[in-house]
Amino acid sequence: SLLILDFGSQYSHLITRRCRELNVYCEMLPCTQKMADLDWTPKGIILSGSPYSVYDDGAPRVDPAVFEAGVPVLGICYGLQEIAWCHGGKVDPHDRREYGRADVQVVRTGDERMDRLFRDEADSVPVWMSHGDQLSKCPDNFQVIARTDSAPFAAIAHTSKPIFGIQFHAEVTHSPRGKELFSAFVDICGAQRNWTMSTFIDKEIARIREMVGPRDRVLGAISGGVDSSVAAKLMHAAIGERFHAVMVDNGVLRAGEAKQVDEMLNKHLGVNVTIVDASELFLSRLEGVEDPEKKRKIIGNTFINVFEEEAAKLEAAAEEEEAKAKAEGKEQEAKGKYEFLLQGTLYPDVIESISFKGPSATIKTHHNVGGLLENMKMKLIEPLRELFKDEVRELGKLLGIPAHLVGRHPFPGPGLAIRILGPVTRGQVAILQAADAIYIEEIRRAGHYDKISQAFAVLLPVRAVGVQGDKRTYDQVIALRAAQTTDFMTATWYDFPHQFLSHVSNRITNEVAGINRVVLDISSKPPATIEWL
Ligand code: XMP
């Protein structure tokens, strides 16, 4: 597998993506990683870009052992400059930043060892540039293998060692030949292309079994979302009965959600799940609260209370079971204690904690669910921490979770409480659940669901006048939201056909008591956010 050393570029994780797409396993570590401390030998090493200049005070420095490891090295942008810096090249601040599309001209040296990085390219390659500094002198023993009009050293190669540097960002989608370039580098490394979801399952199950041992038990919280369900099923595949999941019904779930999760995980997939109906407690604590941050806090804290109480019950039962087995002399069969807590953390959450943040790089630990771990003294187990969302979906399908469930839109932890703009009551929850169910059902029926990143209904606290039958009504308003986004940081609104909107509006106003108007949210993010609270 390949090692990616991250110097803090906003694109670093995309390098991981490109390698994964080629079925090559890779691991990203901070650039401060010492080669001597690695307990595996990479087939090749990629140095990422960085917000730094190589001559900045405190600029991140690569361990020189990288170039002595005898494996191919590819430096991207800052990575190229770092290679040059270490080999006697010269880097200058460029008088103008080069940003955007450019065409690099491939320079064929006639030496196959240097030319093989661009083996699949035409003489001119469209690429994405984003840099301030650039090389002004080629380092010793390197040759130019590509140039642009303004960058004479757009790519370089060592004359005898497999060390390459490229000034442009081959990892971004704006570099349309990026995949071919990484593919050439993978071949130079001789790395195996055998990373698939099914090999991931085997590897991860073995890792979980080794970590948990033959007796310990694992506890997990299920939200109804894709990640926790997939993590739960994987855990069940690894340790079976010794995994137990808890789903807390907080009273602000979507219509029928707790039941659906129970059906799918418990009945269909055989995972131990306890559904705890704590809706009364949550709703009583939410009474009269309008402030969104207060709602979030109450739900987060109440979740911890309920989960811990349930965990204590399960633990007590486990201890009793163990004592009984011992008394009967069946120690071998006894299951142990709940030593581990499962979390469905994904790679994008982890990036935050492994990304290089600056010269004083303290490695941040990412958030665990609302501080559960500190209180519970359990060890954390995160089987999805190497995966992107679409990989989790593929994994879920391989584990037998139905496609319509693994393809579900994300749903926030505080649930419908942040989609009810006024105070949360059972009545308000019921209105929103009914409207949301109609909206989502129609979206699925019309074939829009998989083209939208997140769609939901919002219940507004305003009242408006209407007329139904012969009666004047004074009812609430539902807003329809449908967002399209890749990273949830920015978003645009999805353009439904008018006919569809009119049909959904008719159904909601006719079928949901308490609603006489439907409006459409046509705001992008920014300036709006995806949720209304
Ligand atoms: P915004 O509204 O910030 O939402 O544009 C971006 C994404 O984050 C989700 N979201 C949350 N998820 N707890 C969560 O687990 C929260 O408090 C929360 N607030 C927003 C939102 O649904 C969207 O996917």
Image (tube, rainbow, N blue to C red):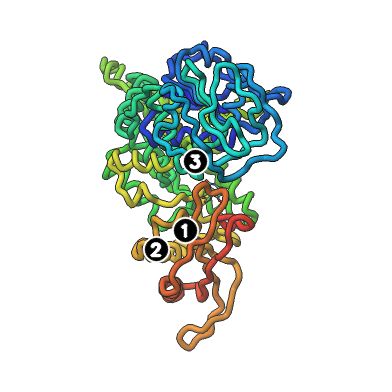
Residue visible at 57% across and 48% down? 489
Q: Which numbered disc, 1 or 3, marks the residue closer to the eye?
A: 1
Amino acid under label 3?
Val
* Closer to the camera in the image, 225 or 357: 357
Asked if residue 7 shows in the view, the reply is yes
Whether residue 367 is situated above or below residue 31 in the rendered picture: below
Question: Which callout, 1 or 2, points at the residue further toward the start of the chain?
Answer: 2
Mark 1 is surrounded, within 10 Å at the Cα level, by few (under 14), some (14 to 19) or many (20 or more) other residues, namely many
Label for residue 455? 1
Amino acid under label 2?
Ile
Q: Which residue is mark 2?
A: 443
Mark 3 is surrounded, within 10 Å at the Cα level, by few (under 14), some (14 to 19) or many (20 or more) other residues, namely many
Q: Dividing the image into 4 quarters, which one contains the N terminus?
A: top left
Regarding mark 3 in the picture, which secondary structure is present there?
helix
For the residues labelled 1 and 3, the Cα–Cα distance comes to 29 Å
Question: Which callout, 3 or 2, points at the residue further toward the start of the chain?
Answer: 3
Mark 2 is surrounded, within 10 Å at the Cα level, by few (under 14), some (14 to 19) or many (20 or more) other residues, namely many
Q: Which residue is mark 3?
A: 306
Q: Position of residue 52 (x, y in %)?
A: 67, 30
Question: Which callout, 1 or 3, points at the residue further toward the start of the chain?
Answer: 3
